[in-house]
Amino acid sequence: QVQLVESGGGLVQAGGSLRLSCAASGRTFSRYVMGWFRQAPGKEREFVAAIRWSGGIPYYADSAKGRFTISRDNVKNTVYLQMNSLKPEDTAVYYCAARTNTYVSASSYDYNYWGQGTQVTVSS
């Protein structure tokens, strides 16, 4: 059974940084795509970033480009989301997700496993 456990959320002032971590266990993830999504109150879950576990270029939502960086550590089986220049509109619960396919997708429906989420709050 795949388990994804997020950590690293918290309260930060606008302009600050946070690094989210997603520890993955239970499978060999070499053929998976790992993604980060977020969901703000009253809004739908939205794509933030994704990366193939095997490597290659990462993919970002327009809102994340230039500010967020997704990366993975194959030894630690951990995916990271470095978030810089945070804005109040980045406030949301951030979820890590795994897709059992090598093709990257920005749709939450294409991801098979999800973490429990970690809250990120950016104050103005």
Image: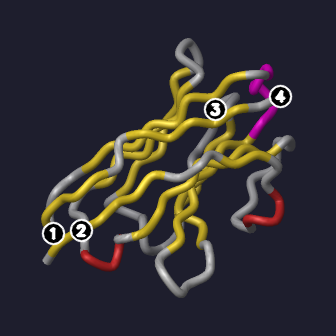
Instruction: Point out which mark residue 122 bears.
Output: 2
Query: As drawn, is 106 to the left or to the right of 21?
Result: right
Q: Which residue is mark 4?
A: 1
Circle 3 or circle 4, nearest the eye:
4
Sequence order check, earlier mark of 4 and 2: 4
Q: Residues within 10 Å of mark 3 (few under 14, many from 20)?
A: few
Q: Residues within 10 Å of mark 1 (few under 14, many from 20)?
A: some
Q: Please, is residue 44 above or below residue 93 in the view?
A: below
Circle 2 or circle 1, nearest the eye:
2
Q: Residue at x 43, y 73 (%)?
A: 63
Q: Quadrant of residue 34?
A: top right
Instruction: Point out which mark residue 55 bears.
Output: 3
Q: Which residues are magenta?
A: 27-32
Query: As drawn, is 15 to the left or to the right of 39?
Result: left
Q: Residue at x 75, y 26 (%)?
A: 29
| Element class at badge 4 | loop
Q: Using the numbered discs, state the Cα–Cα distance from disc 4 to disc 2 in whole angstroms.
A: 33 Å
Q: Using the numbered discs, state the Cα–Cα distance from disc 2 to disc 3 in whole angstroms.
A: 30 Å
Q: Which residue is mark 1?
A: 14
